[in-house]
Amino acid sequence: MFHEHLADLVVPDPILLNISELPRGVDNYHIDVVLSERFRTLFRKLLGDFITLETSQKEIKHKNKQQKQDFQDSYADMMTVLINRIKSDLSREEIVLLQFAVYRYILETTRITLDEMIESLRSKLSETRSGTSGKALAIQDQVFWLSKHYNVILYAINRHFFVLLRQAETKSLRKCVASTLNPRTASSWTSSSTPSS
């Protein structure tokens, strides 16, 4: 199940960001970013499904195409608003940098949620060990399996999201990026996601 994800693994091109035009604090750059509530809600719903899909030791399929489409639409809407802020208060460099807030959010939230799931299972294991439950062995096996495959599971979940983002960028955002940002910036915008396969 996981080996098919690793087969397509490629080294991405380096991404160079010019942050010299961003406002600087005392000794570093600090930018507060708030992602749309709709995007975060749809992300969390899909995250639960992808965690179930990738942590199951049985072959299952994610069938909710509408949920994926809603997530892509919310991403495209959020990014369209961001890109169009070039007309009011953001520079091209700021827009390109701010797009990474989405990827950081996905990477951090996925890791935290998976860690919380594993910690919850460990707590359950401690509770069942105190009794004479037959569930303890099954939970222990599950915790061991999740720990052993942790990085592959994390990669697979994040890849699901990055493929969806790349598809949204290709379908919905390409025209907006090309008409609003210059070609050099537009190419760095669309090269930031993992390529779909």
Image (tube, rainbow, N blue to C red):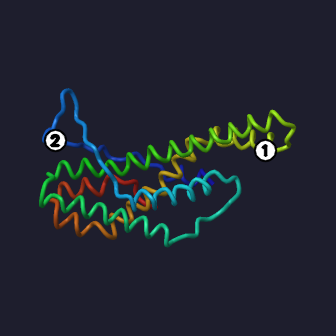
Residue position marked by numbered label 2 in the rendering: 22
Which of the 4 image quadrants contains residue 41?
bottom left
The quadrant where residue 181 appears: bottom left
Q: In x, y percent, where is residue 35?
A: 34, 54
> Does 150 appear above or below 58?
above
Residue in view at x 29 percent, y 58 percent: 190
Q: Which residue is mark 1?
A: 138
Q: In the figure, 153 relative to 167: above or below?
A: above
> Which residue does the image show at 51% across and 71% down from the upper left?
65
Eyeballing the image, is 26 above or below 65? above
How many residues crowd around disc 2 within 10 Å: few (fewer than 14), some, or many (20 or more)? some
Kindly state the secondary structure of the residue where label 2 is placed.
Answer: loop
Amino acid beneath label 1:
Ala
Q: Is residue 47 left or right of residue 173?
A: right
Pointer 1 local density, CA inside 10 Å: few below 14, some 14–19, many at least 20: few
In this view, the residue in front, 163 or 134, is 134
Residue occupying image coordinates x 47% and y 49%: 9
- Kind of element beneath mark 1: helix
